[in-house]
Image (cartoon, rainbow, N blue to C red):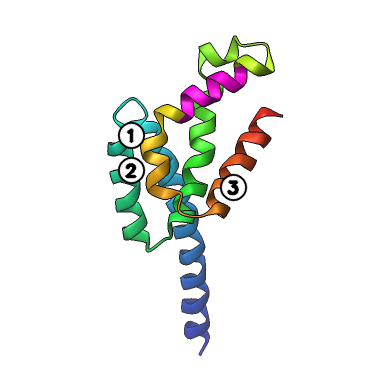
Amino acid sequence: MESDKEEGSEGSDEEDGNRGGFYRQVSEAFRDCSDSDPVNVAMEINSLKMGYNKTYSDCLLGFYSAMLDLLSVDPAFQEVKTAKLKAEKITEFLQKWKPLLVRFIHSADDRLTLLQAIEIFCF
């Protein structure tokens, strides 16, 4: 009996680890492929999605933070002082990643989540 209980708790820990591992791997895939074509990043993230049996929304959560982290360390973005110029830089950045975003954003909630992430990033 006791071994059954231990096995069950290990399975639950493993599931939690897989969830964290999925988001970590999506972030790493985004960072590793950030200099390449966004379509390549989409393919990498999609393979993780299928491997972990996750949803598109799960993928979005994984790469929003990585995407915005990448923008925050961009020297051109760091030099910008006015809100208008920051908005222009964010728009340019989103245009670059549009091919990736359109593959994973499928609902109004997904779009809202992206806007909220950008809003938090800006403040």
Of the 4 image quadrants, the one containing the C terminus is top right
Residue at screen point 61% across, 35% down: 118
Q: CA distance from mark 2 to mark 1?
A: 6 Å
SS for dot 1: helix
Q: Label 2: which residue?
A: 42
Q: Label 3: which residue?
A: 113
- Can see residue 29? no
- Horizontal and vertical percent position of residue 17: 48, 58
Magenta segment includes 123: no
- Horizontal and vertical percent position of residue 84: 65, 17
Amino acid type of the residue that numbered disc 3 sits on in the rendered structure: Thr
* Contact check, label 2 and label 1, Cβ < 8 Å: yes
Q: CA distance from mark 2 to mark 3?
A: 18 Å
Q: Residues within 10 Å of mark 3 (few under 14, many from 20)?
A: some
Q: Is residue 22 above or below residue 13?
A: above
- Horizontal and vertical percent position of residue 109: 57, 54
Main secondary structure type of the part rendered in magenta: helix
Q: Is residue 31 above or below residue 11?
A: above
> For this view, does 78 lie left or right of residue 39?
right
Judging depth in this view, the residue of 75 and 21 nearest the camera is: 75
Q: Earlier in the sequence, mark 2 or mark 3?
A: 2
Residue at screen point 36% across, 56% down: 49
Amino acid type of the residue that numbered disc 2 sits on in the rendered structure: Ala
Q: Residues within 10 Å of mark 2 (few under 14, many from 20)?
A: many
Q: Label 1: which residue?
A: 38
SS for dot 2: helix
Q: Which residues are magenta?
A: 86-94
- Extreme-right residue of the structure: 123
Amino acid type of the residue that numbered disc 1 sits on in the rendered structure: Pro
